[in-house]
């Protein structure tokens, strides 16, 4: 089943790579600097159509007003068709398709694909995480030995002061900071040891659902900033780390 999901996601990535005249298809959504393009809708429709074939009775939860509830379904796809839409609009070439399959409230499969770099992160619960065909395993590096990634929750500017206050504290402890504009990729970068920690004060489930499994299957830690378990049905804060850097974070 994982191979079939990966194939669908890779094919959906072609829509992003072949996009043109993006600026003519932009619409604003609720919230500050929150946009959607016709390609977000096109990718989501493609995923919905083809994943429905794999799991005809699955529920769907997607960023672009996609919510399908079936009767007593054990499965739910959680989808972000283009995580990093602002990047996509501005030709920054750092965006991802994120697909998670939840079974009885636990993420069973997670796939995050950056078509620009042809990097496919994926995991199956209990079977490890991979980047393309390479197994992922987090290194137990301290905050002082690596880069911290963070998100600014741009749709919620009221989070800015506490975001940058925490970023400054972590900047003083780490080698440096990065802010890339795709939470799904940032959490996967944690799994690939490109970061030692990532945080954001407000994310929706489609931002982190797939990547959370990829990180935990690689041996990492992901919780809310309040140290609670993630809830895949509601927005929350997120901190992702390796076990050592997470303890450094708690001490800080």
Image (cartoon, rainbow, N blue to C red):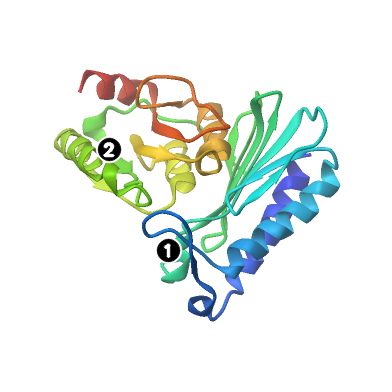
Question: Residue 87 got which mark?
Answer: 1
Q: Residue at x 71, y 36 (%)?
A: 76
For disc 1, the neighbor class at 10 Å (few under 14, some 14 to 19, many from 20) is some
Residue farthest along the left direction in this orientation: 172
Per the image, label 2 sits on a secondary structure element best described as loop
Upstream in the sequence, badge 2 or badge 1?
Answer: 1
Q: Quadrant of residue 90?
A: bottom left
Which of the two residues, 120 or 252, is positioned nearer the viewer here?
252
Task: Count the marks.
Answer: 2
Q: Quadrant of the N terminus?
A: top right
| Left or right position of 142 against 109 | left
Q: Is residue 135 visible?
A: no
Residue 245, above or below 136: above
Which of the two residues, 190 or 24, is positioned nearer the viewer here?
24
Q: Quadrant of residue 127?
A: top right
Q: Is residue 62 visible?
A: yes
Image location of residue 100, percent across then percent down: 64, 39
For disc 2, the neighbor class at 10 Å (few under 14, some 14 to 19, many from 20) is some
Residue 22, above or below 5: below
Question: Residue 146 got which mark?
Answer: 2
Q: Quadrant of residue 213?
A: top right
Image location of residue 58, percent across then percent down: 78, 38
Residue farthest along the front direction in this orientation: 30
């Amino acid at each position: 089943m994982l191979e079939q999901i990966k194939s669908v996601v890779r094919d959906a990535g072609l829509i992003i790579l072949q996009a043109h005249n993006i600026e003519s298809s932009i619409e604003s959504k609720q919230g500050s600097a929150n946009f959607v393009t016709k390609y977000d809708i096109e990718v989501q429709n493609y995923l919905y159509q083809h994943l429905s074939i794999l799991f005809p009775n699955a529920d769907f939860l997607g960023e672009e007003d996609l919510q399908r509830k079936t009767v007593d379904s054990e499965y739910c796809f959680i989808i972000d068709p283009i995580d990093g839409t602002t990047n996509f609009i501005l030709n920054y070439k750092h965006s991802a398709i994120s697909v998670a399959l939840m079974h009885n409230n636990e993420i069973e499969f997670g796939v995050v694909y950056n078509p620009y770099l042809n990097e496919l992160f994926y995991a199956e619960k209990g079977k490890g995480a991979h980047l393309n065909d390479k197994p992922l395993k987090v290194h137990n590096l301290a905050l002082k030995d690596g880069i911290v990634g963070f998100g600014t929750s741009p749709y919620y500017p009221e989070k800015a002061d506490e975001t940058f206050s925490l970023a400054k504290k972590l900047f003083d402890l780490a080698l440096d900071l990065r802010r890339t504009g795709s939470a799904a990729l940032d959490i996967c970068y944690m799994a690939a040891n490109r970061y030692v920690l990532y945080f954001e004060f407000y994310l929706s489930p489609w931002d982190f659902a797939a990547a959370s499994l990829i990180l935990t299957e690689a041996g990492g830690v992901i919780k809310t900033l309040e140290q609670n378990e993630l809830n895949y049905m509601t927005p929350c804060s997120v901190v992702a780390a390796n076990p050592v850097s997470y303890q450094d974070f708690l001490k800080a």
